[in-house]
Image: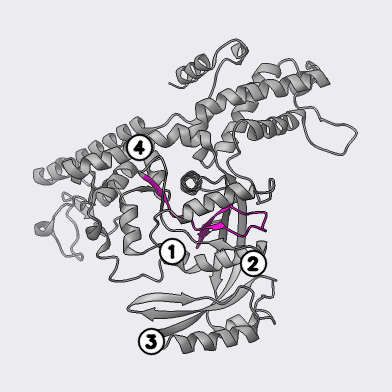
Amino acid sequence: MQSDIESFFDDKEEIDEATFYDIIEYGIHVSELYMESYVSNMANYNFDDDFEENIMQMIIEQYGKQYNLYMFHDEDIESDDLYIDVIMEEIKKQVFTHIVPRRGYTKTFIRHPPNILRICQQLEILRNKPQPEQRTPAWYETRHNLITASNAWKCFESQSKQNEIVYEKCQPLEEKSSTNNLFVNTNSSLHWGQKYEPLSTQLYEYLYSTQVEDFGCIVHDTHKFLGASPDGIVVKEECQRYGRMLEIKNIVNREITQIPKKEYWIQMQLQMEVCDLNECDFLETKFVEYEDANAFYEDGANFNCTNEILYKGAFLMFMNNNIPKYFYPEFHITKEKYEIWESKILEENTDMHFIKTNYWKLEKYSNILVLRNKKWFESTIEQVRNIWSQVLYERGNGYLHRAPNKRERRPTIDLTEETKELSDKPDSNNQCFIVDSSDDEKSVGEKSSVLETNKEDEPEQTIEIVNAVEEETKKKEKKEKKEKKEKKNIPINSFKVNTSTLDTISTEEFIASIVKETK
């Protein structure tokens, strides 16, 4: 007797060449309609997986009953590729070439030679724009009056994140930055990123034999509320990456996945739009610091290479008016050249306080190419504009309602008068109330635990307090549940539509059917 699986495949027709291309054409057609509806979701981390899953589902619904999509594509070659896999790869290739660029690649590469004249002209335009140097008072002031690429992602998040960016932009600048200038936390992840950004730029220049130029805060030509401070742009004409932007992330604990997080992807898209450039290399690095010089020199015979053939090196840290300042030698320098450089830097900077030598190794790095996505920008810029309009309005009409809620102390039961010695044996008619107010991570219900022995004999006042705590907890949970439900977006993987009518319906009808299905 045949199994259900065997009979399932026996009932299917084999896919001939004509049908194979028909399925691909159909997949491209529905993909184009899908992108028109969901291009704004391309910032999402899992967009590629959701897109493939939904298009595959539609192909299976349309062709899966008649054709065996799970047979091997080529019986003559040792390959485990199924027809559905080959079909999806061809669909993605066509979609991401002719309809919309893919969210990101798994590596960096040269797509085609750069347009030297066009890029040269654009770089000159950028250099001539007013752009305060990064992290200067003028730079902070300029950024305060813009939605910047690095924090624009909040415009696409929950109401609390939108409140956060409006509140940040409404606060007076001096009020926001006055405390920041008093002390620099050299142990923070933010400072780690700033400390290793120049070294990451050196790594990039070394790997690709190129030159990267710094730029300040640049304002968009058309959308004057939008600005960006790119980490750098390749300016060496002889390099095939000429005109390519560079975005650097120096991670501390996060895993490198070669898939940019939502906020990073949005940041790169807005940087490319502001600078009117079409390519960006996304460089992630994980540097690790040695405990001391001995550990550094014991790890590999060479000054610039570890036992595991990883890059390593050193740079100097000084303090100038309580502000850390770092000096970096050339990348992959030899020990002899480093010692000469070190002596020179120490001699030239006697007015500053030398702190230490930082010994490092590059444990891991990744560099992938991200392309400019004009369709995504066009579909989302109004959301950013609306947030900025709210900022301008509330600067004059009040913004304090946007302030983050201060964490209130959770209610506890004061049983001071009822306290007994721990050595006393509890009366069988009494109750023991345990209130733990030391753990801020637990919920109110977990904190106010009641160990009951005889509920009928509980003091009325205590019962009222406990009931009040429980009632307040329930109200908060109900409110949070309601807010969460109201804010919930339609998930991309809920995309379903009657595929049998796709050849005859218009795009508008298609989108309407999606909305109807997902309500």
Instruction: Give the quarter of the figure containing the C terminus.
Output: top left
Which residue lies under the disc numbered 3? 351
Q: Which mark is residue 189?
A: 1
Label 2: how many residues lie within 10 Å, few (<14), some (14-19) or many (20+)?
some
**Amino acid, disc 3:** Asp
**Sequence-first disc among 2 and 1:** 1
**Sequence-first disc among 3 and 2:** 2
Q: Is residue 321 above or below residue 471?
A: below
Q: Quadrant of residue 330?
A: bottom right
Which residue lies under the disc numbered 2? 206
- Residue at 65 percent of width and 27 percent of height: 56
The residue tagged with tag 1: helix, strand or loop? Answer: helix
Label 1: how many residues lie within 10 Å, few (<14), some (14-19) or many (20+)?
some
Q: Give, as a single range, the part of the protein colored magenta.
A: 226-254
**Sequence-first disc among 3 and 1:** 1
**Amino acid, disc 1:** Ser
Q: Which mark is residue 385?
A: 4
**Sequence-first disc among 3 and 4:** 3
